[in-house]
Amino acid sequence: MNKQFLTIAVFIVFAVICIKTYAQDDMTPPKPVDNKVLDAMVGDWVGESDMMGMKFNDEIKNYWSMNHQYIIMDVNQVMKDNPQMKFSGMGILGIDKDGNPVMWWFDDWGAPAMMTGTGNFDGMKCHMMSTNAMGKDDRVISFKNGDMVMTWNSSMIGKDGKEMKMNGETVYKKK
């Protein structure tokens, strides 16, 4: 019993010393991100996109998460002519130590389609360049007259090994 008590006491003293030594300021989360472009993205948005000749009704819900460190983008698209055809994705945008945007993208196509990207801010624009094993994406989010405008140039490698290029612009209105 005394040996167990001594072991526990030594462990507690060691833990307290470690916490005081190593966790002083390093354990404080960063201040909430302050970025006018990301703040402008927050909200529920609707728009109509055209992807490879198919028209979709889009809904995007953007919100701050995790101590105001990340914008979460929940994207849902339903094909206008065939409501059975749907697409959903989730983007996570943060800011690196130099103030530049970083992004992770996940969607219905699974892990092989997961993208990572970096970019820059220019006024009220966020420019992101992302890649994965299936292709690349060059996207700009900007704001005009209260609308969020997303412009993209993407390419995807098909099963036949050929590159398919896509581009477009969608104007989103705040709900």
Image: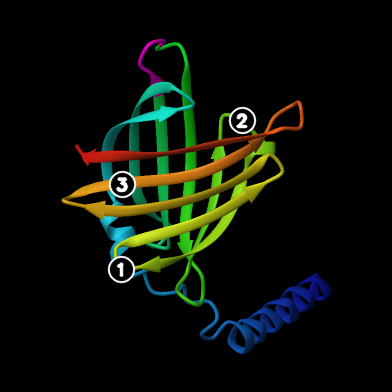
Rendered location of residue 174, percent (x, y): 21, 41
Tell me the tag on residue 123. Answer: 1
Q: Which residue carries the number 2 mark?
A: 109
In the image, is residue 62 above or below residue 125?
Answer: above
Rendered location of residue 154, percent (x, y): 54, 42
Q: Are marks 2 and 1 in contact (CB under 8 Å)?
A: no
Magenta stretch holds residue 140: no
Rendered location of residue 143, percent (x, y): 26, 54
Residue placed at 29% from the left, 33% from the top? Answer: 47
Residue 61: image quadrant is top left
Nearer mark to the viewer, of 3 and 2: 3
Residue placed at 69% from the left, 37% from the top? Answer: 112
- Specify start and end residues of the magenta stretch as a single range: 78-82
Q: Amino acid at mark 1?
A: Gly
Secondary structure, mark 2, is loop
Secondary structure, mark 1, is loop
